[in-house]
Amino acid sequence: MNEKQKAALKAWYSREKLLGQFKELIDKEEWEELEEHLQMRCLFDLSRHFDLPDYMRDEEGHTLFPTNLNPKTDIEVWRDGIEVGWQVIEEKFGVAHDDMHRSIAREQKQDWAQFMARYEAKKAKDRGGEQ
């Protein structure tokens, strides 16, 4: 991905509408939804070439992203694009991609611990009822 493409994506991810959506998801700590939004939903409109802003076009008026950042078409370009999106989120909200993954891991660990506690309580109750 060249510098013009990176700058265009930075502007794309920095649109007020998206920033508001990112902030809402961050405030609610909906990390998995944030990741899905950044990696997928925010990119859908790239396929609507006729609606793209000028900064998303080259000198001839063609899209800067002929693959529409579709991971099925070019996974490396998509990954580079997602990295730009995370840079915007970190710059604007102070949340890094790694921070989000750590939060998800903590949440999953807590969920597992709660599940095991319920299981052990039920097992103890069942054993107490057999006597």
Image: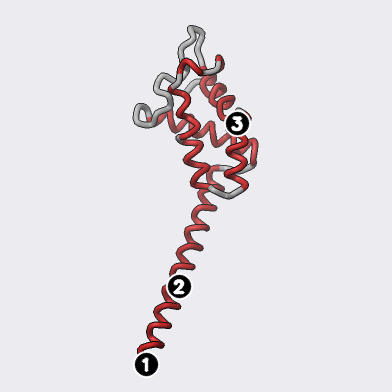
Q: How many marks?
A: 3
What x and y, as percent, mark residue 86?
55, 36
What x and y, as percent, mark residue 63?
46, 16
Residue at image x 37%, y 27%?
Answer: 74
Task: Measure the alpha-carbon separation of dots 3 and 2.
Answer: 42 Å
Name the disc covering residue 19, or none. none
Circles 3 and 1, Cβ within 8 Å, touching? The answer is no
Name the disc covering residue 131, or none. 1
First of labels 1, 2 by sequence position: 2
Which residue in the protein does label 2 denote?
Answer: 118
Which residue in the protein does label 3 denote?
Answer: 17
Against 72, residue 111 (above or below) is below
Badge 3, how many Cα within 10 Å: few under 14, some, many 20+? Answer: few
Dot 1 lies on which element? loop
Q: Looking at the figure, which quarter contains the C terminus?
A: bottom left
Task: Measure the alpha-carbon separation of dots 3 and 1.
Answer: 62 Å
Q: Nearer the viewer, residue 27 or 87?
A: 27
Going by the numbered disc 1, the residue's amino acid type is Gln
Going by the numbered disc 3, the residue's amino acid type is Lys
Circles 1 and 2, Cβ within 8 Å, touching? The answer is no
Residue at image x 42%, y 83%?
Answer: 125
Circles 3 and 2, Cβ within 8 Å, touching? The answer is no
First of labels 3, 1 by sequence position: 3
Residue 48 picture quarter: top left
Against 34, residue 115 (above or below) is below
